[in-house]
Image: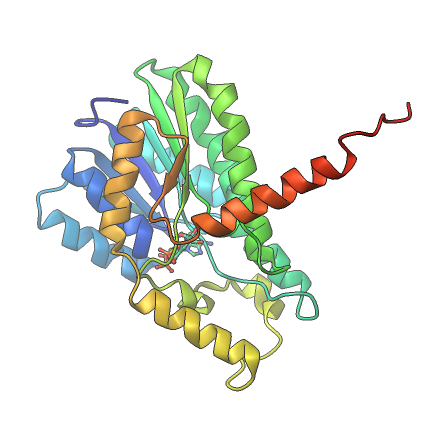
Amino acid sequence: MKELAGKTAFVTGAASGIGLGIATALAQAGVKVMLCDIEEEALSAAVAELKKTNADVDSVRADVSLKAELQAAAEATTARYGNVHILVNNAGVGGGGPYGMWTDDGWDWTLGVNLRAVVWGIEIFGPLLEKHGEGGHIASTASIAGMISGSSNAYNVSKYGVVALSEGLRLDLAPRGIGVSVLCPGFIRTEILNHRRNLPQRFAGAFRGPPPTTGPMAEAMARIRERIAHGIDPVYVGELVREAIENDWPYIFTDTEFEPLVEMRFARIREGFDRIRARVPKR
Ligand SMILES: NC(=O)c1ccc[n+]([C@@H]2O[C@H](COP(=O)([O-])OP(=O)(O)OC[C@H]3O[C@@H](n4cnc5c(N)ncnc54)[C@H](O)[C@@H]3O)[C@@H](O)[C@H]2O)c1
């Protein structure tokens, strides 16, 4: 979608971090942006800040892991701005521990926000993007954790899901004039590790107690916390997403730090084929 000025975008998880960075970059390009988030106060503050730059922005509160709330947010967006051209499925939580720490609520919360809401976003907004014939784009935030998995946790599973969904959807929607991108960030300077602030009551059993303060898990968390604290600027990520929408990039990476691990995964997959290459399958 070459010409962004005057178009309308709906961005989830827009009160903080990458979502706010994307909303900012789109608003700077003259896009009307409906910011959606579960956190009402942060949402109002984000909108007030963006309005100081004369951006045409508004907000709607929704828990995207509830389909009815996402549907109501879509209705609020069309009532406010009319045609919608850009959907950014970005809201996410870092939930879910590895094997041995799994909980049903942890899986349900993480898959609900990070994956199910993306499916619903596409289901609800897809027809709205298609119906006016002015073109459209869907960008969804996965993670580099959607390309490489170092842990058996719900987060990685949800992010692989967003990559799979986006890759398939791109084929489905290209003939309909809708572009599809998947964003796979590395470490970005956001509030993601403070995700327990967004835990809805219905998933209250997601965690087996407070985060560990000693031991290997605590040390790993401290290292990640450090990397995120010194991570990439979310507005820089937003600018990449804007460029991706303008040029219909399938994959949006923020940096090359994890490229060797992606290559290593490809090599292991290739080894899997090599192992059986000379065999003739029994049918
Ligand atoms: N920060 C990173 O290093 C990083 C790396 C890879 C991927 N990501 C992904 O980027 C996306 C944005 O996260 P971030 O890093 O900006 O974190 P963040 O916590 O700063 O922002 C996430 C936003 O999502 C909102 N949110 C959470 N649950 C919600 C719900 N149920 N309904 C509506 N909104 C909800 C939060 O209120 C918050 O405003 C996530 O999908 C995350 O998985 C982040």
Splitting the image into 4 quarters, where does residue 155 fall?
bottom right
Residue 107 horizontal side relative to residue 12, left or right: right
Residue 26 horizontal side relative to residue 226, left or right: left
State the image coordinates of residue 109 (x, y, percent, origin top left).
57, 57
Q: Nearer the viewer, residue 235 or 57?
A: 235
- Ligand 1 sits in which quadrant? bottom left
State the image coordinates of residue 111 (x, y, percent, origin top left).
58, 51
Q: Nearer the viewer, residue 25 or 66?
A: 25
Q: Residue at x 43, y 76 (%)?
A: 222
Is residue 133 visible in the rendered structure shown here? yes
Q: Point out the image quarter for the N terminus.
A: top left
Splitting the image into 4 quarters, where does residue 247 fall?
top left
State the image coordinates of residue 208 (x, y, percent, origin top left).
62, 75
Q: Residue at x 20, y 33 (%)?
A: 31
In this view, the residue farthest toward the front is 278
On screen, residue 241 above or below 51: above
Is residue 66 visible in the rendered structure shown here? no
- Report how many numbered discs are placed on residues in the image: 0
Q: Point out the image quarter for the C terminus.
A: top right
In this view, the residue farthest toward the right is 282
On screen, residue 274 above or below 202: above
Residue 97 horizontal side relative to residue 231, left or right: right
